Amino acid sequence: MRETEAMSTEPATTPTTGTRADGGGPGRTIAVLGAGGVGGLLAALLARAGHRVLVLAREESAFQLVTDGITVRSGVFGDFTATVSAAPVLHEPVDAVLVTVKGTALDEALGRVPARALGGASVVPFLNGFEHVATLRRRYPAEQVIPGTIRVESTRVAPGEIVHDSAFADIELAGPDLARAEHLAQLFRGAGLQASVADDENAMLWRKLAFLAPFAALTTRHRVSGDIVIARHRDELNAVVREIAAVAAAAGCQTDPDATVAAVRRFAPGAKSSMLRDAEAGRSLELDSILGAVLRAAEARGIPTPRLREAIAAIVSAPDVESR
C-alpha cells in the first residue's frame, strides 16, 4: 500500500502534556487509529486526563478534529470537548497506538502505522474477534502487541461527536508482557475508565466473542434490539449461544451460556449491536471478523453450528447488506 506523506496537524493551542490531570506524573503521547465510537471516546478521555493524543486519520478528517476537537456526551463521563492533534501517518515517537478501527478497515488503516515508525510503542487493538491479533504480530514486534477488549456502547453521531450511551466502559488487557499490559491499564484508569489485566489472552478474547457473536448475529438477522431478541427469539438465542460456547470450550475457554443470555437481558431497552447499527446505516458489516472467525474455529475443531450458520445466511441474503 502506498503510504500517505506524513503531515502533522497540530491544534491552534496544544494542550500542556507535562502533568496529567490526576496528578499522576508526566503525560504520555498516545496515537489513536480510528476516531469512531470507541476510538473517539478513548481519545477524548485520555486527552482530558492530560495526555497528548494524536489521531491518525485522513487529512480532511484530521483538520476537522484539530479545529473542533472531539465532543463527548456521556451520562458517566459528562459532556466535554477535548483538544487533540492529528496526522495522516504516524511519524513521531509515541508511547502506545490504540487500534480502534473495525475489522473491515484494518488492512487499509494499518498503512497509517508504518512498522519502522513504531519504535518501542505498545500496539493495543480493540477489535472484535481474535484473528486480528495474529495479523498485527506479523506486522509489528509480537511482544509489543497487547490485545484488549472493551465493553461499551458508544457511537460517533457525526465527525468528532461521540455519544456514550452505556453506564459502563470496561477495558480488559492481556498479552505476552503482563507488566506492559498493567502499565496500559493504569493509563486507562487515570482517564476514568475501568481497566483490568487478564493472564490468559485467548480466554479474554473468547469471553468477549462468546457474548458478542450471538448478540450481533441475532440483532442483525432480525433487525431488532437485544431486548426484542430476548422477547421474541429466546429459543434461537439460547441455541446460538450454546453452539458458540461449545466452540469456545474447544478453543480453550469455558463460558457460561446462561450468563451470556443474562448479559443480553441486562442491556438497556433498545440497545443494538454495532453490526446492526452498521446494517441500518448501509455500512459494511464485520461478518467475517466476528461470525466468520467463529465458523472457522468451529470447522477446525469439528463443532457443528447449524443455528449460527442459519442466522448468517439470513443476514447475507438481505438485499441491503454489504459484508467483507
Image (spheres, rainbow, N blue to C red):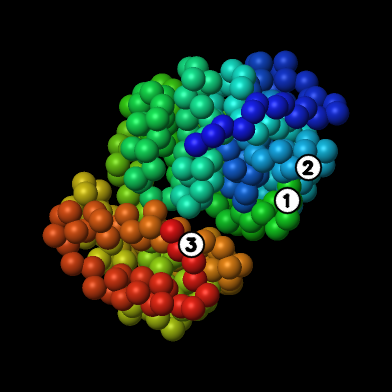
If you read the primary sequence from the N terminus, does the residue marked by circle 3 or circle 1 appear first?
A: 1
The percent position of residue 169, horizontal first and vertical second, equals: 56, 47
Q: Which residue is mark 2?
A: 64
Alpha-carbon neighbours of circle 1 within 10 Å: few (<14), some, or many (≥20)?
some
Q: Identify the residue at horizontal 61%, vertical 67% (top origin).
A: 281
The percent position of residue 165, horizontal first and vertical second, equals: 64, 58
The percent position of residue 188, horizontal first and vertical second, equals: 57, 33
Q: Amino acid at mark 2?
A: Gln
Q: Are marks 3 and 1 in contact (CB under 8 Å)?
A: no
Q: Nearer the viewer, residue 316 or 142?
A: 316
User: In this rendering, does residue 162 appear at all?
Assistant: yes
* Mark 1 vs mark 2, CA separation in Å: 8 Å
Looking at the rendering, in which quadrant would you find the C terminus?
bottom left
Q: Identify the residue at horizontal 54%, vertical 68% (top origin).
A: 279
Q: Amino acid at mark 3?
A: Leu
Placement of 306 over or under 53, stated as above or below: below
Q: Quadrant of residue 173?
A: top left
Q: Identify the residue at horizontal 64%, vertical 56% (top origin).
A: 155
Question: Which numbered marker is on residue 159?
Answer: 1
Q: Which residue is mark 3?
A: 285
Q: Secondary structure at mark 2?
A: helix
Q: Are marks 1 and 2 in contact (CB under 8 Å)?
A: yes
If you read the primary sequence from the N terminus, does the residue marked by circle 1 or circle 2 appear first?
A: 2
Q: Quadrant of residue 83?
A: top right
Q: Are marks 2 and 3 in contact (CB under 8 Å)?
A: no
Q: Residue furthest left?
A: 302
- Left or right: residue 52 versus residue 222 is right
